[in-house]
Image (cartoon, rainbow, N blue to C red):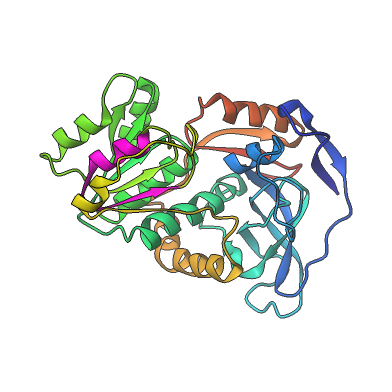
Amino acid sequence: MQIITIKSFGAPDVLEVGDSPIPAPKFGEVLIHVHAAGINRPDILQRQGLYPAPADASPILGLDVAGEITALGENVTDWKIGDKVCALVNGGGYAEYAVAPAAQCLPIPDNFSFVQAAALPETFFTVWHNLFQRAQLKAGETLLIHGGTSGIGTTAIQLAAAFGVQVFATAGSAKKCNAIESLGAVAINYREQDFVAEIKAKTQGQGVNVILDMVGGDYIQRNFSAAAKDGRVVNIAFLNGSKAELDLMPLMLKRLTLTGSTLRAQSAHVKAGIAQELKQQVWPLLNQQKIKPMIDSVFLFAEVAKAHERMESSQHIGKIILTINSPL
């Protein structure tokens, strides 16, 4: 099969098409003929040599795929050959075939293309786990999202709004702020506005109940100021750095919770649990077209370097998808 290889760590041009044997599904796994794969920030870091794959994971890039099941490993009873699925994979997504734990597969929603389905797993698993499991976000609360037009951001806005949450989101251009508003959130242009002051003004000085932050750096301290009493701050990335000098007194005075996670390091048991909750509570919304992934751009398999360049430009709004010699 064809795969995307990394000839050496570095810029996007280190990515090239190569060959590899088709993997065989192990106990509890399925083999998927991949039609589309998602591009995610961890892929960029892995290509740069900053995010090595776990020892038991495929070294091939790619964390979410959509396609058709072509083989079943032992003890797989929930799926059959020919089923169309999207899946959170433990690496190996940039390939014509990928293995996935059966418990991390989900049916492709009604009337979804493979491209749309490939935009779901990594972002929806991440958002569900961090906002609804870790931060216990619930109807009637307020949420601030930093990076509102990323794949994670556009997913978080839609999911939170669908569950009755008032959403605010930051972005750095008028175009991105317009996209945020189109999804039903209140946009804050961080280049022109102080998000702390804006949040306090828009919440009558109360602050927000939950903050989802992928920026880090000086945002960490400012998040404490923007959070309401008993607020929860969740860090899932640190685009501006993971180190900061902090005054932690607000954590005590406001009774704040500061938490965070990475998805790839989670156990198979945790990921299976997330998949089940998504199937029960989110997939009906997708099937009814009440929410759907925002797709920024689609690239052919051999254009993978351009796809990475697009993500690194930070100009994208929504998810970037790679198609793999297959129907959309």
87 lies above or below 211: below
Which image quadrant for residue 26? bottom right
Above or below — where is 44 with respect to 25?
A: above
Question: What count of labels does the image hold?
Answer: 0
- 211 lies left or right of 69: left
Query: Residue 269 in the image: x percent, y percent?
Result: 57, 71
Magenta region includes residue 225: yes
Residue 135 magenta-highlighted: no
Q: Position of residue 67 (x, y in %)?
A: 68, 55
| Residue 310 screen position, x and y as percent | 60, 27
Above or below, 16 against 73 in this view is: above
In this picture, residue 110 sits left or right of residue 91: left
* Front position in the image: 57 or 168: 57
User: For the point 42% across and 60% down, which residue is it?
Assistant: 282
Left or right side of 10 for 188: left
303 or 224: nearer the viewer: 224
Q: Quadrant of residue 6?
A: top right
Q: Which residues are magenta?
A: 219-235
Q: Measured from the top left, where is residue 236 in percent x and y?
A: 47, 47
Q: Nearer the viewer, residue 16 or 260?
A: 260
- As displayed, is residue 327 above or below residue 310? below
- Residue at 26% x, 26% y: name it: 194
| Residue 259 visible in the picture | yes
Which residue is found at the position 70% from the left and 59% from the top? Answer: 68
